[in-house]
Amino acid sequence: MARPRRGERRQEILETLARLLEEVPGASITTAHLASAVGVSEAALYRHFPSKARMFEALFEFIEESLFTRINRIAAEPLTPAAKIGQVLRLWLAFADKNHGLAYLLQGAVLAGEHERLRDRLAQIYERVETHLRLILRDTQLAPHLPAPLVCAQLLLAAADGRIAQAVRTRFRVSPVAEWEAQWALLRRAIFGDGDEVT
């Protein structure tokens, strides 16, 4: 039986780590546990990643590549700002719904005891999403009584992140996309008014 190529083994390690994040939420995953789940020695893990922190960073890179490539595409489409915001938030929630282990990672609890730079990296992902929302909001005329685009962007991100937090808290018995369309309709009307429909 052929041995997996280096890139394939690396991918297998990351997929196994993401699966373990879902299966044992809140527990610290040791390299020994991860190596056993992959079916290799700890030394073999370190041939692919110099540290567990680097494994988490690779997961963050996957999250960023998966999300921001598509967010940039949405931002460039000839849609209304409300439609763009709606698509970005749906993307964020659907990604969490499809990737439970990465949703646990996005909530940060699994990083307890890990290197501080990982929490900084996580914060950067949220800051990037917020920045994209703010830039889209900047391109629209908000109602005069509303606060600045930054405040609206923070509210929208907090609402979507709250859906992910609830899913994680219930171990996905409650899906992050459950009831989201009704909730988004309320947020959309509050920020954009009834005239700016989502497409």
Image (spheres, helix red, strand yellow):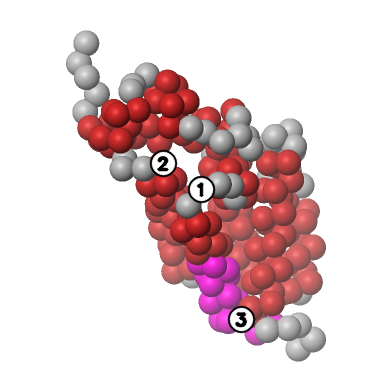
Which of the numbered marks, if any, corresponds to residue 114? 1
Considering the numbered disc 3 on the image, is that residue within a helix, a strand or a loop? loop
21 or 196, nearer to the observer:
21
Q: Please say whether residue 189 is one of the residues in the magenta stretch.
A: no
Q: Which portion, as a residue range, is magenta? A: 127-142
> If you read the primary sequence from the N terminus, does the residue marked by circle 2 or circle 1 appear first?
2
At a point 78% along the width and 53% down the height, the residue shown is 182
Q: Mark 3 points at which residue?
A: 140
Q: What residue type is labelled 1?
A: Glu
What secondary structure prevails in the magenta region? helix
Alpha-carbon span between mark 2 and mark 1: 9 Å
Give residue 52's mark. 2
User: Which callout, 3 or 1, points at the residue further toward the start of the chain?
Assistant: 1
Q: Residue at x 53, y 42 (%)?
A: 102
**Where's residue 24, x and y in %?**
60, 30
Task: Inspect this view and state whether residue 161 appears.
Answer: yes
Q: Identity of the amino acid at label 3?
A: Thr
- The disc placed on residue 81 is none
Q: Which of 5 and 157 is in front in this view?
A: 5
Question: Helix, strand, or loop for circle 2?
Answer: helix
What residue is at 24 percent from the left and 24 percent from the top?
A: 4
- Is disc 1 surrounded by few (<14), some (14 to 19) or many (20+) residues within 10 Å? few
Residue 140 falls in image quadrant = bottom right
Question: In which quadrant of the rendered view does residue 10 lie?
Answer: top left
Quadrant, the N terminus: top left
> Which-is-in-front pick, marks 3 and 1?
1
> Label 3 crowding class (10 Å Cα cut-off): few <14, some 14-19, many 20+?
few
Q: Quadrant of the C terminus?
A: bottom right
Residue type at numbered disc 2: Lys
Circles 2 and 1, Cβ within 8 Å, touching? The answer is: yes
Quadrant position of residue 82: bottom right
Please provide percent x and percent y for residue 64.
44, 55
